């Protein structure tokens, strides 16, 4: 599976980073950076949680 | 051994609990019960992007992966903590070894419901959006964050909007300084604000009137109220779990070892006392802790609650880390304009602080660190 970011939607709340700190982080400007785009196995569970907590649905798994 | 876990509530608290129960290794039965027929969605989006503009997907969350049995459109009616069963309105009873109570809250109403719209659920948002299509005059009752967001969205949808507020809008939520910033922006965008000591509704034929304590009568085609929420605990009335009508949990979300509660329904210990904090991130943080505690008890970490609040309205985006409301003016950390972009900080007596980003992009972890840092 691949994490997809809808960048214009992202408001930089950072809840995804809190849920899956190894997969993504906000840089100093508050822009979301995906550290892993391809996720499987254990990472997939964390990715799912991260995608779900986004209040503006800026993340997708496809 | 917690083999069968039942979650009552399909909002973000119930959904997060399901995700975290699975992540923490629960591979037994998992059942989620909820009275809404929709799959879980983002509630914060309902009062923002959902009401105006073309984006009808802003509330959508990805499909669940928790492999739980979902029973949507079913209402929990009673809890028997001795038999460990949840009675449902379809006449069945669900047995559990572990229970997550996440029934949330509902909109408090001013009247008996007729002619009064509220905004809490996806169905509410769809109904309100449909009513705005021909740009009718709108009255919003309630000067809290939700009422102001609704007013902003209705203005953006092209409606003339009057906001009836008990006292100055947002004063109780944000404090004097930020309330002034938001009310100024709102009035510049055309919002009419009526301040009152209290207001009630009156039906006049097909119309609904808002009557203030001072005798002002405001009438509009569409009346929306946003006057607080009531937690959904009626189904727990005979459970023995309520104390003075409240559902209190410990710092790990537990009501008792086999029952946890999270989200808007639960009152939990914070640095400012035991209270409900009916906000999106609060529900998520509580649910993670509660899920772990249901499986691991005292070995699970306690909740270290860090308030995080955001709102978007009248062209302003505010993110706040730390407790609200805020007394007096802030120290400006970056920027100096009261309407942003600016990064501000308020110091509290206990040494903590609240950091606020107004139209200012900043990673939230950094905002949280700024709130905690003691002033130099």
Image (spheres, rainbow, N blue to C red):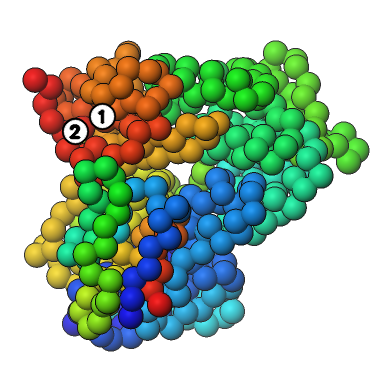
Q: Where the N terminus of chain B falls, by quadrant?
A: bottom left
The location of residue A57, given as percent across then percent down, is 44, 60
Q: Residue at x 57, y 80 (%)?
A: B91
The location of residue B221, given as percent across then percent down, is 81, 37
Taking depth in this image into account, of B198 and B132 the one nearest to the observer is B132
The location of residue B212, given as percent across then percent down, is 70, 20
Q: Residue at x 59, y 79 (%)?
A: B90
Please report, as a chain letter, where disc 1 is located.
Answer: B
Chain-order first, disc 2 or disc 1: 1
Element assignment for label 2: helix
Taking depth in this image into account, of A58 and B114 the one nearest to the observer is A58
Task: Determine whether label 2 and label 1 are within 8 Å by CB.
Answer: no
Direction from residue B41 to residue B83 in the image, left or right: left
Residue B326 lies in what quarter of the image? top left
Q: Residue at x 51, y 64 (%)?
A: B60
Q: Where the C terminus of chain B falls, by quadrant?
A: top left
Q: Are marks 2 and 1 on the same chain?
A: yes
Which of label 2 and label 1 is nearer to you?
2
| Category of crowding for the residue at label 1, using alpha-carbon neighbours closer than 10 angstroms: few (below 14), some (14–19), many (at least 20) | many
Q: Which mark is residue B354?
A: 1
Element assignment for label 1: strand
- On the question of residue A31 being in view, the answer is yes
The location of residue B262, given as percent across then percent down, is 34, 57
The residue identified by callout 2 is B370
Please report, as a chain letter, where disc 2 is located.
Answer: B
């Amino acid at each position: 599976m691949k994490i997809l970011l809808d960048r214009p939607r992202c408001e930089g709340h950072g809840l995804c980073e809190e849920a899956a700190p190894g997969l993504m982080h906000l840089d100093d400007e508050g822009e979301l950076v995906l550290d892993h785009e391809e996720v499987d196995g254990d990472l997939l569970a964390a990715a799912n949680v991260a995608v779900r907590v986004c209040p503006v649905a800026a993340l997708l798994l496809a | 051994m917690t083999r069968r876990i039942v979650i009552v509530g399909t909002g973000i608290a119930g959904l997060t609990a399901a995700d975290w129960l699975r992540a923490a290794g629960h591979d037994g039965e998992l059942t989620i019960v909820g009275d809404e027929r929709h799959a879980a969605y983002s509630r914060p989006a309902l009062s923002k992007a959902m009401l105006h503009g073309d984006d009808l997907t802003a509330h959508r969350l990805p499909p669940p992966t928790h492999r739980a049995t979902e029973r949507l459109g079913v209402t929990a009616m009673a809890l028997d903590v001795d038999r460990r069963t949840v009675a449902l309105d379809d006449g069945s009873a669900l047995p559990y070894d572990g229970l997550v109570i996440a029934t949330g809250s509902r909109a408090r109403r001013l009247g008996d419901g007729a002619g009064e719209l509220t905004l809490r659920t996806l169905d509410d948002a769809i109904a309100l959006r449909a009513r705005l299509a021909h740009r009718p005059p709108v009255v919003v009752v309630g000067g809290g964050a939700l009422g102001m967001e609704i007013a902003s969205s209705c203005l953006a949808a092209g409606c003339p909007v009057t906001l009836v507020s008990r006292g100055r809008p947002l004063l109780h939520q944000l404090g004097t300084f930020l309330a002034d910033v938001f009310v100024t922006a709102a009035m510049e965008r055309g919002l009419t604000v009526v301040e009152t000591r209290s207001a009630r509704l009156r039906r006049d034929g097909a119309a609904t009137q808002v009557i203030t304590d001072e005798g002002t009568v405001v009438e509009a085609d569409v009346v929306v109220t946003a006057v607080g929420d009531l937690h959904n605990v009626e189904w727990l009335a005979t459970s023995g779990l309520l104390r003075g009508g409240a559902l209190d949990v410990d710092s790990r979300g537990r009501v008792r070892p086999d029952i946890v509660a999270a989200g808007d329904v639960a009152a939990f210990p914070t640095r400012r006392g035991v209270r409900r904090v009916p906000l999106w991130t609060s529900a998520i943080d509580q649910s993670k802790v509660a899920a772990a505690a249901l499986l691991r008890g005292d070995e699970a970490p306690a909740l270290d609650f860090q308030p995080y609040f955001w709102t978007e309205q009248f062209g302003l985006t505010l993110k706040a880390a730390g407790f609200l409301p805020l007394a007096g003016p802030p120290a400006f950390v970056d920027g100096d304009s009261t309407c942003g972009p600016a990064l501000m900080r308020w110091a509290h007596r206990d040494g903590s602080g609240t950091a606020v980003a107004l139209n200012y992009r900043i990673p939230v972890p950094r905002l949280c660190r700024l709130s905690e840092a003691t002033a130099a």
